[in-house]
Image (spheres, grey):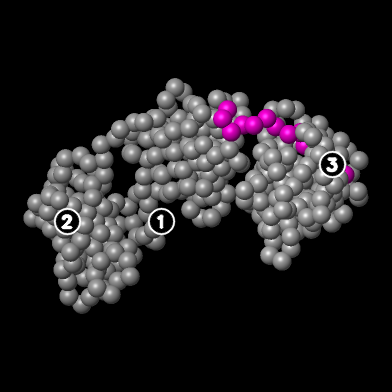
Amino acid sequence: MAAVSVALGACTATNKSADGDENINTVTASLQDEWRLDSYRVDCESTQFDATSNYELTFNEPDNTFSLSTDCNMINGEFGITNDTIRFKNILVTEMACDNMIVEQNMLRLLNDSTAYAMCHGDTLKFTAPYIGSAIFIKQEDKRHTSDEKCFIGEYTDQNDGSTLQISENPNPGPSIQISLFRLTDIDNGIGKISDDTLTFTATDAAGNPIKGEITLDGDTAHLTFIESSWVYLPKGTTYSFVRGAKVDYQPANPIGGRTYTGYGKGGGLTTNVTIKFDKNGRCQCTSDFYQAFTQPITVDGTYSIRYDIVEVRCQPAGFDVPIEWNFKIMDDGQGLGFDYSDASEEGSIDTDWLHLKVI
């Protein structure tokens, strides 16, 4: 990343090393917090942005990091000041593909230009790249304790399946979002911004790709909609509803405790025979060839848990690095257990003769 020079008119700095052998200073509150993109002029064409735009540059002094929100992706990196020059390095850009990316492209051009510099005068910060153009940022008011953000802060639960949403206060760069979707995925690195009573966040999905969502409030109910997603299991438009402070009973009556089930069928890519003896306290014994890993069935102690009508069984034979996990659906008031193949993609081409167990 090329350096971006800065002549600091009203910006001050304190001495703090942040780059190995180089003596890089750290900015004070003059650069701390958020700066809104007010306008830029690129290739002799000017663009003005209104006060409601979400194009914001944020400096985080304690970590020497910055982030820039654009019309598509987030630009993140590190910064430091030496000899009245601000420099940006280790820049990362999320890789969401959007219909409109002009702001992102123009700002990256300005930031990457080797001759670029900036001047800070009070509440105005101006970037200049002599051969490309310039950008002006206006310092935003302190948002660390805005009433809008406080309205969203809290822990929410989906009363249908126990999925959870947690929104935590985080002044820079914005509220942090943690989502746990029952038997699907966890998203724990979301960063949000609030505008027009909507909390929009960017995070990373289970495949390592960017994912975006919007959260709105209706009283104590938070409505979540994923607005940009490339993950097949969480497509664009997927919605969830969570209730603030809701209490959900994850442990219904145990219809399988004290019973033994046996069966034969496909699961995990191969056929297997399974007999499971459940006690009433979350322990079980699994007798199986474990997908033909053993010539004769062996017995292994294991554990199980029930969440609504799904039994999650975990048994780990000697020599296995991780436990064998089965998810069974309780059928016929506990008379049978059906291998839960709701996510059939995990089983390749298998679509018949799934593993089913019957009580004995």
Q: Residue at x 29, y 35 (%)?
A: 248
Quickly name the residue at label 1.
345
Classify 318 as above or below 75.
Answer: below
Q: Is residue 146 left or right of residue 291?
A: right
Name the disc covering residue 9, or none. 3
In terms of sequence position, does the residue under pointer 1 or pointer 3 come before the other?
Answer: 3
SS at mark 3? loop
Left or right, residue 120 beside residue 155: right
Instruction: Say what secondary structure mark 2 lies in.
Output: strand
Image coordinates of residue 224 in percent, x first then y, are 48, 34
Q: Quadrant of the C terminus?
A: bottom left
Q: Which residue type does callout 2 highlight? A: Arg
Q: Does the stretch in magenta take in 137?
A: yes
Depicted 24 relative to depicted 30: above or below: below
Provide the residue span drawn in magenta: 133-146
Asked whether 343 falls inside the magenta stretch, the response is: no
Identify residue type, mark 1: Ser
* Label 2 CA crowd tier, 10 Å (few <14, some 14–19, many 20+): some
At a point 26% along the width and 40% down the height, the residue shown is 250
Q: Which residue is mark 2?
A: 283
Q: Position of residue 283 (x, y in %)?
A: 17, 56
Q: Residue at x 86, y 39 (%)?
A: 41
Which amino acid type corresponds to the residue marked 3 in the rendered image? Gly
Task: Identify the element where label 1 is drawn.
Answer: helix
